[in-house]
Image (spheres, rainbow, N blue to C red):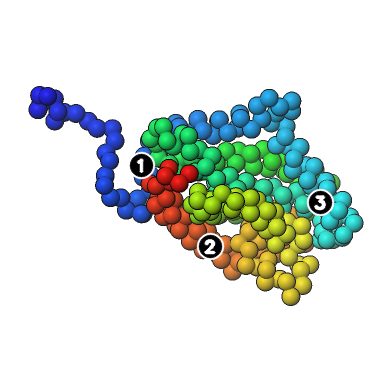
């Protein structure tokens, strides 16, 4: 080959023998942003393909869950706080918890679910878990519209709702939930890559974990003996802050210390999850 032609060649990919564990190829992720949008669209379409109601399930699922929680835990068990619309109390918790749990469970099986794609074509592997976070964010946006519709109704018809400045923390809460779900999901994905039965255990654990958050029982109604269980759960402060901002102090408490703990926990799991993912992605095709 002519040396002048060879020198002018521009390589699209460079394969290096050693890569740092902290090298997440973020520039490549940005360059493949079109692929990210396509994967988000694929997830959105495939979830409701060949269904009668289609995207309406985004509204039906949280609404039905909220109605059941309102009847069982609110009216029968009397766990909801007084002075706050019970339906709105449970809908707020379900909206926030659903986003985190979906991000966690789907990210935890990202290697297994996409093994056929990983083995055929190269692209930054971090694109896959990021597409899960973004697609679930769209789902949460739809559910948030449902929550805001009920919130506006009760706001103009029920004076017990007292929104405050903490509503401005909502974007931060989204970032914390997304980071927490992504980081924990990446850590667990490295384990489920070798031990498949852990994915079944995770589904069960996430369901149990919901009872260790204020989704069903407000923090103010938990006795001192079991209060520590809710406080070590980083999702507790996120749900409490969301309710405090939109519903007022009667529904939740705003604890800056707990919120800081959740932020620190998120940073740690994101860093650890990224390192583990960066290490495992090089060899996972041998064990998947």
Along the line of sight, which residue is nearer the eye, 223 or 120? 120
Q: Secondary structure at mark 2?
A: helix
Residue at the disc numbered 3: 69
- Judge whether residue 107 can be spotted in this image: yes
Q: CA distance from mark 3 to mark 2?
A: 29 Å
Earlier sequence position, callout 2 versus callout 1: 1
Earlier sequence position, callout 3 versus callout 2: 3
Q: Secondary structure at mark 1?
A: helix
Q: Quadrant of residue 40?
A: top right
**Dot 3 alpha-carbon crowd within 10 angstroms: few under 14, some 14 to 19, many 20 or more:** many
Look at the numbered discs 3 and 2 and tell me whether their residues touch, using CB distance below 8 Å: no
Residue 246 on image: x %, y %: 70, 53
Residue 221 on image: x %, y %: 79, 67
At x 65% / y 68%, what residue is drawn?
Answer: 231
Q: Which mark is residue 265?
A: 2
Q: CA distance from mark 2 to mark 1?
A: 26 Å
Q: Judge from the rendering whether residue 287 lies leftward or rightward of residue 134; answer left or right.
A: left
Q: Residue extending furthest right? A: 76
Q: Which mark is residue 27?
A: 1
Q: CA distance from mark 3 to mark 1?
A: 45 Å
Look at the numbered discs 2 and 1 and tell me whether their residues touch, using CB distance below 8 Å: no
Along the line of sight, which residue is nearer the eye, 286 or 247? 286
Q: Secondary structure at mark 3?
A: helix
**Dot 1 alpha-carbon crowd within 10 angstroms: few under 14, some 14 to 19, many 20 or more:** few
Earlier sequence position, callout 3 versus callout 1: 1
At x 84% / y 51%, what residue is drawn?
Answer: 70
Q: Which mark is residue 248?
A: none
At x 47% / y 55%, what residue is drawn?
Answer: 273
Residue 211 on image: x %, y %: 73, 59
- Judge whether residue 281 can be spotted in this image: no
């Amino acid at each position: 080959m002519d040396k002048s032609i060879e020198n002018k060649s521009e390589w699209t990919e460079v394969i290096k023998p050693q890569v740092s564990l902290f090298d997440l190829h973020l520039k490549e992720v940005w360059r493949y942003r079109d692929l990210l949008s396509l994967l988000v669209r694929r997830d959105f379409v495939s979830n409701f393909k060949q269904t009668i109601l289609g995207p309406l399930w985004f509204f039906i699922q949280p609404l039905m869950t909220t109605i059941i929680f309102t009847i069982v835990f609110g009216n029968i068990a009397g766990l909801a706080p007084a002075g706050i619309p019970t339906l709105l109390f449970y809908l707020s918790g379900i909206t926030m918890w659903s986003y985190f749990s979906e991000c966690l469970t789907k990210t935890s099986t990202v290697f297994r679910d996409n093994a056929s794609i990983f083995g055929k074509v190269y692209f930054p592997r971090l694109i896959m878990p990021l597409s899960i976070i973004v697609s679930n964010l769209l789902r949460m946006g739809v559910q948030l519209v449902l929550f805001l519709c009920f919130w506006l109704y009760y706001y103009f018809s029920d004076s017990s709702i007292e929104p405050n400045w903490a509503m401005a923390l909502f974007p931060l809460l989204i970032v914390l939930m997304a980071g927490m779900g992504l980081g924990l999901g990446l850590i667990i994905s490295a384990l489920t890559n070798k031990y498949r039965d852990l994915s079944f255990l995770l589904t069960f654990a996430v369901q149990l974990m919901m009872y260790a958050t204020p989704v069903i029982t407000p923090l103010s109604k938990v006795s001192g003996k079991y209060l520590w269980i809710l406080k070590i759960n980083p999702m507790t402060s996120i749900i409490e802050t969301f309710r405090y901002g939109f519903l007022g102090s009667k529904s939740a408490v705003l604890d800056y210390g707990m919120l800081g703990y959740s932020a620190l926990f998120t940073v740690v799991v994101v860093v650890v999850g990224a390192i583990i993912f960066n290490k495992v992605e090089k060899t996972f095709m041998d064990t998947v």
